[in-house]
Each structure stands twice: as structure tokens, then as C-alpha cells.
Amino acid sequence: MEVKDIKVKNFTTADFRDNEYLEKYVEELRKGGVNVAIGKLDDIINWGRSNSVWPLTFATSCCGIEFMSLGAARFDFARFGWEVTRNSPRQADVVFCFGTIVHKMAPVVKRLYEQMAEPKYVIAVGSCAISGGPFKKSYHTVMGLDEIIPVDVYVPGCPPSPNAIIYGMMQLSRKIKVQEFFSLPKEPKIIVNKANN
Amino acid sequence: MFHFEVVTKWIDTFLMSNLPEWLALTIEFVLIGILILSAYAVLALILILAERKICAYFQCRLGPNRVGAWGVLQPIADMFKILLKEIITLNRADNRLFRLASFLVIIASLLTFGALPFDKGLHAIDFNVGVFYLLAVSALGVVGIVLAGWASNSKYTMIGAMRSGAQLISYELSCALSLMTIVMLSGTMQLSQIVEQQANMWFIFKGGIPAFIAFVIYLIAGHAETNRGPFDLPEAESELTAGYHTEYSGITFGFFYLAEYLNMFIIAAIATTMFLGAWQPLHIPGLDGFNMVMDYIPPVLWFFAKTFFCVFIALWVRWSFPRLRIDQLLRLEWKILMPIALANIVLMALWILVF
Amino acid sequence: MNNKLEQIFSQIPSAEISNKENIYTIYVSKENLRRSAEILRNNDILDFDFLRDIIGMDYTDSFGVTYNLSPSDDLTIIVLLKSTTTDREKPAFDTVIDLWESAPFYEREVHDFFGIRFLGNEDMRRIFLRQDWRGYPLRKDYDNSPIINPVPKDNENLDDMENLPVLDLEDLGKPKKSVFDKDEYVVNFGPQHPATHGVLHLRISLDGETVKKVDPNFGYIHRGIEKMCEAYTYPQILHLADRLDYLSGSINRHAVCMAVEKGLELEVPQRAQYVRTIIDELTRIASHLLGWGAMALDMGAITAFVYGMRDREKIMDIFEQTCGGRLMANYAVIGGLMADIHPEFQKKVKEFIPYMRKMLKEHHILFTGNPIARGRMDGVGYLSREQAISIGATGPVGRSSGWSCDLRKHAPYAAYDKVNFTELLRTDGMTFDRYHIRLDEIEESLKIIEQLIDNIPEGDYCAKTKAVIKLPEGDYIQRVENARGDFSVYINSRGDKFPYRVKFRSPSMVLVNVLKHITPGTKISDLIMLGGSLDYVIPCIDR
């Protein structure tokens, strides 16, 4: 199934790399077909969601400085409407993981993620957050953020330039734009292991 | 000069003549409710965009420019997002109070909003103690904020709420005292009459020096009431993460967010009403030609132009000054603003006696 | 050896003393360690009042500690006070926390990494690793298996964080001592907090708005760099040094390069020396701009922060063009530079100097003269000269307290002995001094660059080195002045291509110690502002 043209201003679909992954994603989502009315409603909701991604101010190390550059005059992510950085995880939509996650930090990151309200997204920025990066040999480093929480977009680099982070954020926008709101299962299946309680 | 009074009067007489009184009144109430709510929401969106754009230009940035032309649709996208965001229920919090708090804040600012005289005949309520009403309902907001801090059962929100309680109650005094100065000058508390009296000359000019002092004090104290700018201690992003609304998510947070911007507008609007003649055009006694020209500009435009000028000043202050410390904040109020405001009342009394 | 030192050293009982380029190594037995430290600290001739670092060592058959000391009046002298113990089960030394205020954190660090106890220091909590961590990672026989220490699922128990551990058997029956009393109102600042400049965790006891006690908790970005260095060759270590204090990454890298060059006795070409100095100063300006902006941000002035970042981008442009990287310049290598400078480098730097001067004026107008900013900074956060020395607060913080500690003057390296610049000193030691000295130092750095940029000599940009770099056996110490103070690299080599032990002295760690000392009695807002005025970088602390 073709990905319909996802409109991102000043950026055509062909300009994005890695479109096959999104095609697969859409295929998975649209398995049962899409209702026209609901599909349109979804489009409106996704338009709102993808254009208003409020990041959590959270940085562990070096890449955090590039995040600051991103917010400042030269790169200005306010253009995309992302400048409303929230300090409270409850109000944020996306958590950028800038930098290495170590053993002591891992439960904290997990809790941060759990504190966020749905829908929530995660972007792993920098080699450390992707795989441990230059600190892979260390005794105290977690080998990638995805060992702890699910990750939506990976931005490689050590540290990635702000341009790369903007590209990653636009990839996230695209991902949000193909998601579905109404066809989510009404009751999430939660398996409670009573023996453990 | 076109006044909205014509429209509102016409609707009123039309409904009253065709329907029984109770039905006509019900329809009017509903109409007014819908109008105020939608005006409230639209204004908030405009203010949010305005702040983001103006702040961006202060900081040599561009601000939102991808969603719609010049980013005009940005706050609408935000609205869609925030409406559909999960509302988190806290585990160890007093959830009833927790929910109530966000409503209290927005209700308080809505109630104040209804009393603003946008134009002749374009206000929902016009008490003969209008000024008292404004002060009373705008002070309700602090209950919501303190409740939010308390019910969240978190240390950050608690500190934020305590700060907010101390700050809002203190600055309420200066606010009220500076408004009283104008009440002395006008001799009435009814907002419509206060506005009428400024037809020839706005109070800030008519009242001379004491009125100007009162205006400045009101701007400072009012700015502090909105929890913004150098007075944003209850939120204090860099200290208390998000202050009293740290634990709120989704639209419950959206209420605080909206109320914050609308309060900024309301404070500016009250300043406009009391000092800058609300919807009255700029009239200079003696210059009839000039006054005629000014009359051609619709009164509603006058109101919003003056209000947005005050809002702009608030934004300017907010984006240039660092935050005060709690003891400095209270010292500013109790040792500087309030004594001046009290002395100013005496000065105004003398002014009225002499002129 | 000069007379004064001879007099002092003669008092130390049964010491083995050796000297190499003003670095005096004193080896004493474990029993005499405390006595020797007292002699060095409390004598009338030359007071060694600056404890730079305590370095733990594992010599496989024994454990050792090295106290890196200097007198505050004469920073050219370094004394390494060494001692060892053969007890591998329960290694212990006497504590020195009553002699130097910087010692508590250092002793906790050595305990955390090596399991060496310090008798008399009650606070032997782990400082970087979790309290329930098994093993001591910097020991040579440490088992790195993830089965022993898996990624933890739960948050650390807060009681564990504040209760002092019971290590002696005779203490078992006694009630547990804790940092905080039971009825204190303790608030957690961090690890995720907008104003802790990274993932620092401060536990603060409050009385209303007033701060009573601060207990810093590190390790949320502890990446084990020192252990990793032991498994990497020297050129590989450079990349880790960059990522310690990322805001002065180039300067740290420079330090490691110089330490290795010293060991190899390598002559670095003048061209490289000049360019390294210019890059260092540009890094310092970038760091100070960010520090200035971050402090303003902590005080609630967001616009000032954006202005600081805007000017910083100009430097990033220069770096991107010449070095290839923005934040991590990766420019200095052992023997010189990675590549020659870009043809436009000189032009761009010369354009930047007048631009920065103009912008500095704007920054002063925007923030320095602001009545609210001045009101906030006045009368808060006094740090006396004695305390600054005792805690070991170097860099702008030490200099704003009146301690002349600029290593560019006291121990010149690269091209610093060829330029004229003044070491800026302020005497008051208040928050405003710490704020203002950074802006002044930017001006001073511009002067240094101005003098060097037109005189970069022609020639090679890198000396020839062997493919495999092996350092001769011995200790190598190199100090540099990074944007936060005295950054020292200690390399212990056994003639291998890997170092036996690498220790980085973090200037930021002592700054958190300063925060602990100057905040009690101030308000919460002040605590955040003081943190900004000290301008620490957390990954440098945690290493």
C-alpha cells in the first residue's frame, strides 16, 4: 500500500529518506481498511497533533547543548511550533533523550516516560541514546534508550547538528500524521499477574 | 459612531415582543453565554499567537511560521492537540479538589471577562458596584491556584501555591487602591458610567498626576496578579518546574494556560476601562475637527487597540526582566507600592478639591 | 629543591622524596600519612592549602591513595603525597576531611571506586554509583558482567540515599545516622529539573522558602570514563576527554594531548601551539556565553539566554569550518592538530572579535545594569578566599573571591607565555562578581586571540608520532585552565600502549561543593541562581 502524500511544509515526501519503513507502518495500521468519515477526522486530529509537539526539557549530556542551540536564534524550532518546552512531563508530548543513559538514570527515565500523558513520543538523539555510542564499553552505561522505553525516532550523531535534530522532529511529525485516533482499541489489554501482587 | 448597543437592544426587543419573558431571557442568557465563551476562546488563541510571535521578535527569532500563513493556525493546532490529550488522574491526590481547581481558575477569569465594557451596550453585566465585582471575582482565581497546589499532593505545587497565595493577596491591595483612586474621581462604581464620564477626556488625563501614578501602580500590580513576567514566582519554570500546575495534563492544564493569557488581557482591559476610557475615542477638548476624525474609528476597535497596547507592555516587561525573589516581591508590594497607592488616594482627594 | 620545601619535607617522618619538574612525589607509610598531611597543611613556612585531588590506585597487590597538593600562593609546585596499604579485604586510610574542605567528596569518590575506607569520615555513602551497586569498578579485578549489576528497574530508595552506611561491625547496634532529620521538609531537585544544568540531584531541606541544607547526589550521568581509559590507547582517550566537560571540550582534549606529549618528550610545532591556543580561547568564550545565558535563564530572563546562544553560534561557525565539528571540535591530536586551519579561519576570527565586543556591550545593557538582576545578585552567596582555596574552587569562581589561580599565568602552556593578558581578579566573592568576571574574561580572551591571530607561524601543523604510542613508566600530570577552572589530567603509565590509570580532576565537582557551603540561609530562587553563577557541568563531575 502506498503512503499517501504526507504534507510537511517545505519538504516533499521524496526528500525524506527511509520511506519504506513508514509504508510498512501504514500498512500495518490500515489492515482493516479506513472509514472515510473517521479517516477525515483522524486527519484533522493528526494535523493538530503533528503541528504541536511540545518537548520536555530533559537533557543528560552533550546533546543537550545542541538542543539549546535549537531553541535559540539560529535554528529556532519555534518555526515549527515546538518552542513551548514544558518542564513538567505531564504536559509534554515528546521526550527527547539527549545523551547517555546510565544505570542510575534508567529508572528515572522510565518514570519520566510513565509520567507523560498519552499520546507521547520519544526521540533518541545522539549515538549514546541509540546504542551506548562511545561509552559502549563502560560498566555503567545502558546500551541504548530502547532497552528501557519505546523509541519513535533515532537521530544519529555525536552530537548531531541541530539540523539533524530538526530532520528527526519532522520524521516524527510524519509518523504522527499517519497514525489513527479512532480505531484504537477501546480497552487496552492489561495482563495483571495476580500472583505477584 | 456605531455602537453595538443598537444590535443588542434590537435583539432584546425582538425577543421580548415575540416570546414570553422567561423564554426570551433564557435565550438571551444562552446567547450571551455562547458569545462570551467563544470570544474568550478566540481571544486566548490570538493572545497565545501574539505572545509567541512578539517574544520571537524580541529574541531575534521568527516564531511559528509553518502552520498556516505566518503561523496563524499554530494555536488552533495546539488546541486540537491539548483537547485530545490524556488527563492523568493522580494516585495519592484529592482528585475532586484537583479537578475543581482548574475549573475555578477559568470560571474566575470568565466571570471577570463578562463584565468588561467592550462597547456601549456590549457587556454581559453592568452592576452599580461594577468595580467591586471585578475585584471580587478576579480574586477568586487565587482559590483555584492554591487548591491546585494543595490537591496535587506534591512539594513543588505546594511551594508554588503558597507563593501564589502570598503574592496575589498582597498585590490585590494595590490593585484595589489604585482603582479606588479612579472611583473617587468618577464618583461611581458602575463601569458604564465610568466609561461615559471619559467621553471628553480619559481619566488618565483628567486625573492628572495622581491618575497617572495610579495607572502605573495598577499596571505593575495587575501584572503581578497574572503570574507573569518578573512576577512568575508561582510557576517559576527554572525553580519549581511548572509551579502549581506541575501535575496537570491535557485540557486541565489547558485551562490554566488559557486563564493565564486571558488574565493578562483582562488586566489590560480593566486598565483600559478605568484609565484609558474603554471604547471612548481619543478626544482633546477644543480640537473639534480632530475629535470628529477620531469618532469615525469604531469604538470596539478603540477598546481592543488600547487593550493590546497594555498587553504589549506586559509582554515587553515579561521578556526583558529576570524574576524577582519572594522577599523582594513582597517588599515591593508592602513597602513601596501600597504606601504610594495610599498616599495617592490622598493626593487624588486634594486634586479633586483643587480642580 | 628550594629551601622552604626542604624545611617542610624534613619534618615528614620516614618519607621517600623524589622530584621531577617541580612535581615532588612523597611516599609515606600508611601510619604516617595523616601526620604528613597535617605537616603539609599546618606549617608556617608554606601552607599546602589547596588539595587538588585524591587519586585512588589499585596496584593489583595493594591499594594506594595519592593526594595532589599545591600551596595556593605558588601553584607551580605540585606535591604528590602517596601511600599504600596491602590489606585488600578492608583497605583503609585516615581521613583528612578536617584539613581540607574539598576532601569529603574526594574520599567518597575513592571509596566508591576502590572500596577504600577513610577512618574518621562518617559519610562513606557511594557518590556516583547506586547504593546497592555490587563491587568496586575501578579495581583491576572488577567483574564487568551485566549479570552482577543489571540495569535497575526501580528507582533508588531515598532512605538509602540519605542514611549513612554502617561499615564498622562495632557500629551495628547503634541507630542509623542520616543526613536529614526525620521531620525535615526535604525536596528533591532533579535529576530531571530545568535548572540543575544536567542531571544533578540535589536534596534540599527547606524551612518555608529558606534553604537549610543541601545534599548533592551525583552519578546520573556517570559513564565510567576513567575505567574505559584503561582499556583504550592514548589517541582513543582524547575522544572521551572531549565529552567530559563538553563546553570546554577542546581545552580538556588539549590537556590530555599535552600530558601524552610530555611523556613522549615530543616537540609540538609552533603553528599547532598557536592554533590550539586560539581554539581554546574561542571555546572559553563560547562556554562563558552559555554560562552567562544559563545564569540569566535561571533567574528567569529567557531573552538574555537566547542572545548568548546567538553569539555563540558565530564561534560554532568558525569551529565547523576549521575543525569539522560544532560542539565537539575534535581538533587537537597528540603531536599537533588533526588538520590545518581553514583558509578563511583568520578572516572569520578577525570578524568575530569586533562583533563580540559590540555584543558584550549589549549584554551589559540588557542584564548587568538591570535593577532586578542587580537586586537579585546583591548580597547573596558570599565565598571567602580561604574557603574558595580550601574547597578548591578554581577558575572564575576562585578568581572572583580573590584567589589568583589562573594556570595560564602560573603554569603557562601552549602560546600563553607569548601573549599579554591580565589575570582578572575580583575581591568581593559575591554572586555579582562571579557573574561579572565571566563577561570580563570574554573581553580578555578576545585580547589573547587578537594578539595571536595575525602571528600564526608557518610550518607543520602536526609532529610525527609513532603508529603505536607507548608512554614510558611514570606519572604524568598536566593542568590546564578550562572555562571552569583547574582541569588536571593524571596519567599513570607502566610503559604499555594503554595507560594503567587515568584520573581527570573535575573543576565542576568542587563547585557543587561550593554550592553546598554557600546556600544555607538563602531562598530557593537564590539556590538556583547560585547554581547558575557557579556554572558547573554535570558530566564533568560524574565522568
Image (cartoon, coloured by chain):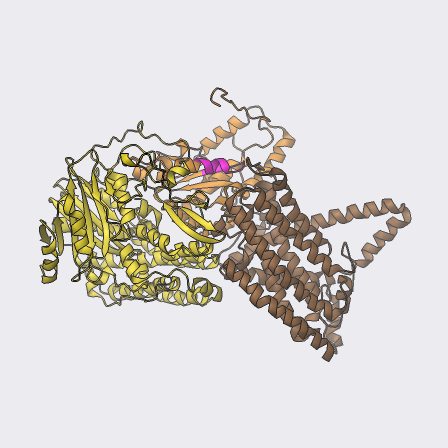
Chain colours: A orange, B brown, C yellow
Residue B257 is situated, as x and y percent measured from the top left of the image, at: 59, 48
Q: Quadrant of residue C230?
A: top left
Number of marks drawn: 0
Q: Which residues are magenta?
A: A110-122
Outermost residue to the bottom? B354
Residue A121 is a magenta residue: yes
Q: Is residue B17 left or right of residue C351?
A: right
Residue C521 is situated, as x and y percent measured from the top left of the image, at: 43, 56
Q: Is residue B275 left or right of residue C121?
A: right
Q: Does the rendering let one see residue C49?
A: yes
Whether C286 is drawn above or below B180: the answer is: above
Outermost residue to the top? A195
Which residue shows up at 71% across the image and 52% down it?
A: B111
**In front here: B270 or C251?**
B270
Q: Quadrant of residue B292?
A: bottom right
Q: Does the rendering let one see residue C330?
A: no
Which residue shows up at 56% across the image and 67% down it?
A: B335
**In front here: A167 or C373?**
C373
Whether B303 is drawn above or below C538: the answer is: below
Q: Quadrant of residue C469?
A: top left
Q: Is residue B140 left or right of residue C113?
A: right
Residue C140 is situated, as x and y percent measured from the top left of the image, at: 20, 35
Q: Is residue C461 left or right of residue C160?
A: left
Residue A137 is a magenta residue: no
Residue B94 is situated, as x and y percent measured from the top left of the image, at: 59, 39
Which residue shows up at 53% across the image and 51% down it?
A: B235
